[in-house]
Image: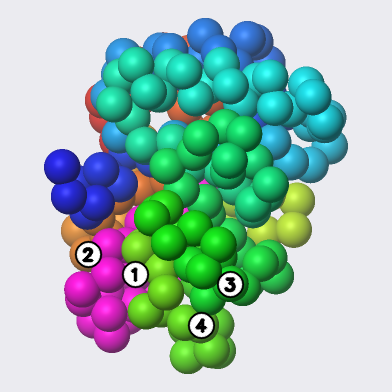
Amino acid sequence: MDLSNQLRKYLIMGSQNCSRDPVDILKEAIDGGITVFQYREKGPGSLEGEAKVELGKKFRALCRNHDVLFIVNDDSELVEPLEADGIHVGQDDVDVEELRTLFPDKVIGLSISNEDELLGSSIEAVDYLGAGPVFDTSTKVDAKEAVGVRWIERVKRLHPEVPLVGIGGITVDNAHEVIEAGADGVSVISAITEAEDVAKAVEKL
């Protein structure tokens, strides 16, 4: 499967996003049809050290058994122990060119939220872009201002060859707008982790 298709339904999650067993939520999301999972154990209430690695290994095993792409967020030191398929970073994390040298065969994703970031990033070093926050989001404490679907259109127009995922504030009700604007996929946290019926929420995305 090419990367554009693999990015279609992209779940980002850590234990801090879950009010019940995160492993159960991931199982249900996989049953519903997510195509990629990003392990983001970060922020208030998140696990650290060995506990973080142990949860990551459970997630990794589930993804491997169901052919779901497994990405880690920011933490390059987790890539090897979790045998991750790739890593996603923001603008303030490790430089993507440095990451490409470290992990020549891994999938590398980069978040882009404005024109300066777009012009100042080494797009040629990454495999896909995360554009957003498309809509207002309450999940990330330090989220930037929402940029709307026009930002999706702009990034896609400038870099049509790079797979693109919309990120931030995406729900089952507005996901179609992001896809219609040209994104290859939508990435969500609470739209899945807080859903009453996780599998059904994934299907609707």
Image: 119 above or below 130? below
Bounds of the magenta span?
A: 147-169
Image: 170 above or below 124? above
Q: Position of residue 188 (x, y in %)?
A: 47, 41
State which tag comes first along the sequence, 3 or 2: 3
Q: Position of residue 61 (x, y in %)?
A: 46, 18
User: Which residue bears the numbered disc 1?
Assistant: 152
Front one among 44 and 66: 66
Q: Looking at the image, do the residues carrying marks 1 and 4 touch, with CB atoms under 8 Å apart?
A: no
Q: Quadrant of the C terminus?
A: top left
How packed mark 2 is, by other alpha carbons closer than 10 Å (few <14, some 14-19, many 20 or more), is: many
Q: Position of residue 14 (x, y in %)?
A: 64, 30
State which tag comes first along the sequence, 1 or 4: 4
State which tag comes first along the sequence, 4 or 3: 3
User: Which residue bears the numbered disc 4?
Assistant: 121
Q: Amino acid at mark 2?
A: Gly
State which tag comes first along the sequence, 3 or 1: 3
x 47%, y 90%: residue? 119
User: Which residue bears the numbered disc 2?
Assistant: 182
State which tag comes first along the sequence, 1 or 2: 1
Q: Nearer the viewer, mark 3 or mark 2?
A: 3
User: Which residue bears the numbered disc 3?
Assistant: 98
Image: 74 above or below 162? above
x 73%, y 27%: residue? 52
Q: Looking at the image, do the residues carrying marks 3 and 2 touch, with CB atoms under 8 Å apart?
A: no
Q: Quadrant of the N terminus?
A: top left
Q: Amino acid at mark 4?
A: Ser
The image quadrant that residue 67 belongs to is top left
Q: Amino acid at mark 3?
A: Glu
- Give SS at disc 4: loop
Q: Looking at the image, do the residues carrying marks 3 and 1 touch, with CB atoms under 8 Å apart?
A: no
